[in-house]
Image: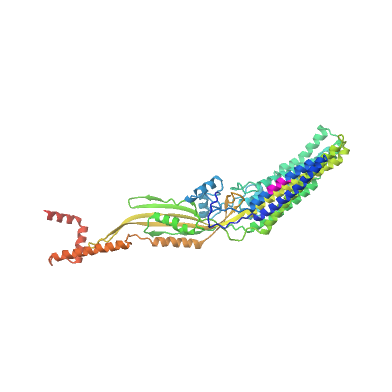
């Protein structure tokens, strides 16, 4: 959307400055941390150590990610460019002055409603934004917290993803407990008892990492025109697999592979030893941190939900001497134009497009509908969130990011130490002599999954924080007007006396007008972003309130216009009035001269003149006959 500058701004300030400061600090810390290992590269390479290359890789990664965080943070601190065409419209805007902007909104798929949806909401006193949840998991969460239905789609998706994350974590632990029971009870065989648990623990951690990654990727403000389906785990299938996999594994090792128990124990002791409980504890801690950063904000936002669907309505029948088109012109060009916010054109979602149908020469019917919204103004009501909770979310997000990179550094250093250990051996050592190197690798495994855990936790918190800081609420007046009725035409003439020198003849249209006006003061939410397309996401109608005061003003202005109409044309120019007076004086003088030349018997009074003129006007045939006889 173009930056449509105007001296009268909308008063929208940059909402991301606090979040940007946190990101800048994180970026600076990462860049500083990346410089330190780079300073060790030269010394380590001269000593022929593999750690020199590890230091180089680590330093470049830290500096690159630090620069990325720093750049994003600085972007959020830059000036927030807001023109006079924001925020996005509810439906396609037919206003002639906003054609380019309306087409861009349509192309970018930012329109959440259409004109029929808005008409249905006003007429039916309902809000179609509050849609039914989709999926088993979503229904469970909405049953536990019914107010989730009254949140914008991005926040509903966020709440559903958090609920799914917790339930998947608990379900994974339960399934691992089932595997442990199957293996411990001997159902999987003796060999599987040694090797299945480490393999299943590794699979469990991979499952959790994939779940967290999918959760992080689904938290965003793009493509939120509809609700996402949030289903649950196929718990029955997973439960069956947790029983069958150990049994099948045991059968394979016992009967097909015919592995020796002692060999399996050695493999397990040296290659599959894995501190799964430490990683699970770390994952549980990260999960708690994520919930601490998100749940207070969601709870605060839930308390602010006010799902009203109220409207103010006016219906009447008016009998006025006015052309139907004049009603439509006055409503659109005067009454509604007077309600512009900072003189910004109203958003026209359905044009009046009046339809006049002539049923005969002098009568007919008319019909027209209009849906219009005034320019949304930034709501002055109490903020949706507690700033302290939003600061906490941003702080925890950056803390997780820094913790993740610290664990990543430990992972790379352990990999380098393991490589150096095995390089120091003249030959491939025996299994027992490999224990120190294996321990280093096991530590590297712990740091690797720890890095993934906090990296994904930081990504989830960063995206959630961006949603919390970016939600803005706007207030506007949404109006529907339907005007229909019938009209008849008749002629009215004035100045028809024989002594009148001027005459006015007018065609008067008598209309029977039935207006139906419905208005609502709506509160809408939009999720802003940083950069060029800062306020071009879908806008959600959250609240519909009555506005009887504004409706009363509209009706009063409409009636005042109808009562003030003039049906008979008159002379308003001073020059024309002087000219008409001059002509009248000439006519009087002429009648006086004619009267002096005639005899007293022939003189007629003014009343007799008027009666004679009226007779001739009403009996033109007799006048023509008399004129014919005189000519003979």
Residue drawn 78% across the image and 36% down it: 248
Q: Is residue 338 or residue 562 the one in the foreground? A: 338
Vertical side of 91 occupied by 419: above or below: above
Q: Where is residue 33 shown, x and y percent of the image? A: 75, 49
Q: In this view, does 102 lie to the left or right of 426?
A: left
Q: In this view, does 177 lie to the left or right of 313?
A: right
Residue drawn 52% across the image and 46% down it: 103
Q: Is residue 363 or residue 386 the one in the foreground? A: 386
Q: Where is residue 166 shown, x and y percent of the image? A: 71, 50
Task: State the extent of the magenta-drawn residues as a range.
Answer: 62-69
Q: Residue furthest left?
A: 632
Mark yes or no: residue 579 visible.
yes
Q: In this view, does 206 lie to the left or right of 18?
A: right
Residue drawn 50% across the image and 62% down it: 548
Q: Where is residue 7 shown, x and y percent of the image? A: 53, 57
**Could you tell me how many numbered marks the image carries?**
0
Q: Where is residue 312 shown, x and y percent of the image? A: 50, 59
Q: Is residue 193 or residue 380 the one in the foreground? A: 380
Magenta stretch prevailing secondary structure: helix
Mark yes or no: residue 235 visible.
no
Asked if the stretch drawn in magenta spans residue 437, the answer is no
Where residue 319 sits, quadrant-wise, is bottom left
């Amino acid at each position: 959307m173009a930056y449509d500058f105007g001296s009268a701004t909308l008063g929208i300030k940059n909402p991301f400055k606090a979040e940007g400061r946190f990101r800048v600090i994180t970026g600076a810390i990462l860049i500083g941390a990346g410089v330190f290992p780079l300073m060790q590269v030269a010394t380590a390479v001269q000593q022929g150590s593999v750690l020199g290359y590890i230091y180089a890789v680590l330093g470049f990664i830290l500096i690159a990610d630090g620069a990325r965080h720093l750049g994003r943070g600085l972007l959020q601190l830059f000036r927030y460019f807001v023109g006079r065409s924001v925020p996005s419209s509810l439906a396609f805007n037919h206003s002639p002055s906003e054609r380019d902007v309306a087409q861009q909104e349509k192309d970018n798929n930012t329109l959440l409603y259409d004109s029929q949806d808005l008409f249905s909401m006003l007429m039916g006193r309902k809000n179609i934004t509050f849609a039914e949840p989709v999926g088993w998991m979503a229904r469970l969460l909405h049953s536990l917290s019914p107010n989730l239905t009254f949140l914008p789609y991005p926040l509903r998706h966020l709440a559903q993803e958090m609920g799914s994350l917790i339930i998947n974590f608990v379900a994974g632990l339960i399934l691992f407990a089932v595997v442990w029971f199957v293996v411990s009870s001997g159902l999987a065989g003796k060999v599987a008892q040694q090797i299945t648990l480490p393999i299943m623990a590794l699979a469990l951690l991979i499952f959790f990492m994939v779940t967290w990654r999918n959760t992080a990727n689904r938290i965003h403000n793009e493509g939120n025109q509809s609700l996402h389906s949030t289903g649950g785990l196929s718990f029955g299938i997973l439960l069956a697999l947790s029983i069958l996999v150990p049994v099948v594994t045991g059968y394979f090792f016992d009967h097909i592979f015919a592995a020796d128990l002692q060999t399996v124990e050695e493999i397990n002791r040296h290659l599959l030893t894995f501190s799964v409980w430490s990683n699970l504890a770390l994952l549980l801690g990260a999960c708690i941190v994520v919930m601490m950063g998100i749940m207070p904000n969601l709870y605060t936002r839930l308390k602010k939900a006010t799902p009203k669907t109220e409207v103010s309505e006016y219906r009447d029948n008016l009998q006025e001497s006015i052309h139907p088109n004049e009603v439509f012109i006055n409503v659109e060009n005067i009454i509604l134009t007077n309600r512009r916010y900072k003189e910004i054109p109203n958003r026209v979602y359905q044009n009046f497009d009046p339809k006049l149908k002539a049923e005969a020469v002098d009568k007919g019917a008319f019909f027209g509908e209009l849906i219009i919204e005034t320019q949304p103004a930034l709501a002055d009501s109490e903020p949706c969130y507690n700033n302290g909770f939003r600061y906490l979310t941003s702080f925890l997000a950056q803390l997780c990011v820094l913790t993740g990179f610290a664990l990543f550094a430990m992972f790379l250093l352990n990999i380098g130490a393991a490589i150096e250990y095995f390089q120091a051996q003249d030959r491939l050592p025996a299994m027992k002599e490999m224990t120190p190197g294996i321990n280093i690798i096991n530590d590297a495994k712990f740091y690797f999954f720890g890095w993934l855990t906090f990296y994904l936790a930081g990504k989830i918190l960063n995206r959630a924080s961006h949603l919390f800081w970016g939600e803005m609420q706007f207030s506007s007046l949404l109006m529907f007007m339907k005007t229909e009725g019938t009209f008849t035409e008749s002629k009215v003439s004035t100045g028809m006396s024989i002594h009148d020198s001027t005459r006015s003849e007018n065609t008067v249209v008598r209309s029977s007008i039935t207006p139906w006006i419905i208005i609502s003061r709506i509160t809408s939410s939009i999720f802003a972003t940083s950069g060029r397309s800062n306020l071009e996401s879908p806008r959600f109608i959250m609240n519909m309130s009555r506005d009887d005061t504004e409706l009363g003003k509209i009706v009063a202005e409409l009636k005042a216009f109808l009562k003030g109409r003039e049906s008979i044309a008159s002379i308003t120019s001073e020059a024309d009035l002087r000219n008409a007076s001059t002509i009248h004086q000439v006519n009087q003088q002429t009648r006086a001269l004619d009267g002096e030349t005639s005899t007293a018997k022939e003189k007629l009074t003014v009343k007799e003149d008027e009666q004679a003129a009226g007779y001739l006007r009403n009996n033109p045939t007799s006048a023509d006959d008399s004129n014919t006889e005189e000519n003979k």
